[in-house]
Amino acid sequence: SFFGLGTTADVEIGLNGEDTRKKIEAKIDKDKKAMYPLYFDGESVSGKAVQVRIREGKRLEHLGIKVEFVGQIQLFYDRGNHYEFLSLSQELAAPGELRSSTTFDFEFKNVEKQYESYSGINVKLRYLVRVTISRRITAIVQEKDVWVYSYRMPPEVNNGIKMEVGIEDCLHIEFEYNKSKYHLRDVIVGKIYFLLVRIKIKNMELSIIRRETCGAGSNQYNESETITKFEIMDGAPARGETIPIRLFLSGFELTPTFRDVNKKFSARYYLNLVLIDEENRRYFKQQEITVYRIQGQSFNAR
């Protein structure tokens, strides 16, 4: 993280142990990914905050240097406003001038990071170290992002899902899944029972949908994204037939379920079962599932 200050100085933010810390490849744009050091809730964030390199024979006058650790939510429809839910600050230097290259250390101890990092379609939740060198004209601001994971204990109660799809006198299907809450490397196991089939079904698909909601009222935005879709049956089922389902979640770019994070956004997951008949009419049933992260899970990120 370098920032050129004309011909006077360069600034770099370095974090302690960054070379040995796990890195997360996170999606930061539609087609763009970047690597970030991984931190957890309650973990300290420390480093060589500012390495200010002063060019030979130059000096840097300033009105104070500070370092912050910030957690913020950015809503893409409201780009000018960043909602900060976490803001810690330390003064590194009182007003004065730097005549030679200087390094400032910093440490934010046992920082509570109550939310997990997230980069979605309309919203981004990010954590960053920000260094500000105040000057009379314009402040020099340099930022460095980190990525945060939040682990959850497996739920004590995890009931299965049992549902029916029916069109009177035409179709009656029951389907069940082994549970309603899944960790990121879990397997969805289920069965579909055909109790009555009087329409000509051509095929059947199961998909996982992520629905992102942000904002409120007239500024509420909903985006649905199909994470995966696969065919579980091709051809007409017979009455009394049972079709097994087995879907491994570890191959997909999932996040945990987020519900009303800081009253700004949610990201929820749904299993969507679609039946298509010979006239290409679609019949579907959707069921929400909860996704959570447990310790020791893979290091992919969104």
Image (cartoon, helix red, strand yellow):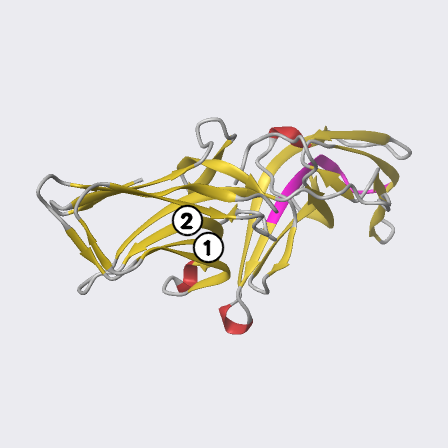
**Does 3 lie within the magenta span?**
no
* Lateral position of residue 6 relative to residue 229, left or right: left
Q: Position of residue 153 (x, y in %)?
A: 76, 42
Q: In the image as oriented, which residue stretches furthest toward the top?
A: 20
Q: Which amino acid type corresponds to the residue marked 1 in the rendered image?
A: Val
* Lateral position of residue 233 relative to residue 18, left or right: right
Q: Pick whichever, 46 or 29, lies toward us.
A: 46
In the picture, the quarter occupied by the N terminus is top left
- Distance of mark 1 from mark 2, alpha carbons? 6 Å
Magenta part of the protein: which range? 197-210
Mark nearer the N terminus (1 vs 2): 1
Q: Are marks 1 and 2 in contact (CB under 8 Å)?
A: yes
Locate residue 55: give its quadrant: top left
Q: Residues within 10 Å of mark 1 (few under 14, many from 20)?
A: some
Check disc 2 and report the residue beneath it. Answer: 129
In this rendering, does residue 272 appear at all? no
